[in-house]
Amino acid sequence: MAERQHRGTGTVVAAGLMFCVCMGTGGCSGTGSAAEDSHASDPVETLHRAADTLVDAGTSKASTSMEMATGGTRVTIRGQGDYDYRRRLGRLKVQLPQTPAGTAEHRPITELLAPGALFMKNRGAGVPADKWVRVDTATLSDGNLVTGGATDPYTAAELLRGTRTATYVGRTEFAGIEVRHYRGTSDLALAAKGASNGVRQALTAAAKGFATAEVPFDVYLDDQGRIRKIRHRFSFVNGRQKSTVAVASTTLLYDFGAPVDVRLPASKDIYAGKIAER
């Protein structure tokens, strides 16, 4: 019964956060030519392997940024946390935008990311402070690529499995590390076919729910093939106004191998009531 109630909250949760969703900052420019790097020979195949490379890396810390312009105002949500790629579990603390007066409107939302599920604490809207809200990501029209105000880092990598076209831009430096810059377009339906269980269902939902299945991206890999920065540009339909909204999501990964201990909430700690629409 509780599970059915949580799934029913997906649309409301999406409506509560989508108005605060944001586009991440832009990337660095390439400094080298394709001939200078052997990885330029097959950029599509290189990107198809990016998610597997993160699994080999084990863990990392992550920073996220999501930006959207709405009503003449550009709002940004930022997140900070860590991720275990082998267990497919992550934790982010997501900060909603400030009010026009420059004050925080809401306490940071703690999000736990798991295959097929999003758990949120401090969601507000009538949820007790000590309870978590659970959402089945496959029930969300965007597959939780934008709903939670942050794109799951592993899902962002799995999106690259759907890369149809990609260009090697060149070598550059990001956060003091030499990286290779690629630019391309991923197909959500194709990515879903090659994705792991849990992510597959979410990407399948997104392929049906987004305004277009094509997702342009810029990604920066270090010399070990690990994603250091990835920026996706999504296009989804606003459920209330039926208008197409452009969103950019940026994920930064660093401190690979850092200790990560993510534990999902017990059943008794998950809110079973109705979430009020904000």
Image: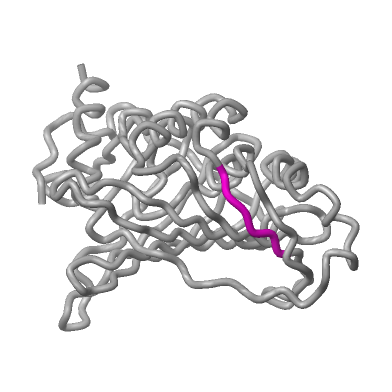
Vertical position of residue 24 compared to residue 101: above or below = above
Counting the numbered discs, the total is: 0
Closer to us: 278 or 81: 278
Closer to us: 278 or 129: 278
**Where residue 56 sits: x, y (%)?**
76, 41
Residue that protrudes farthest toward the top in the picture:
1
Vertical position of residue 35 compared to residue 245: above or below = below
Q: For the N terminus, which image quadrant?
A: top left
Magenta includes 182?
A: yes
Magenta includes 261?
A: no
- The region drawn magenta spans 181-186
**168 displayed left or right of 246:** right
Vertical position of residue 114 compared to residue 19: above or below = above
**110 displayed left or right of 242:** right
Most common SS among magenta residues: strand
Residue that protrudes farthest toward the bottom in the picture:
101
At 37% across and 31% down in the image, what residue appears? Answer: 208
Vertical position of residue 59 compared to residue 67: above or below = above
- Residue 184 occupies quadrant: bottom right
- Residue 133 occupies quadrant: top left
At 40% across and 58% down in the image, what residue appears? Answer: 93
Closer to us: 259 or 172: 172
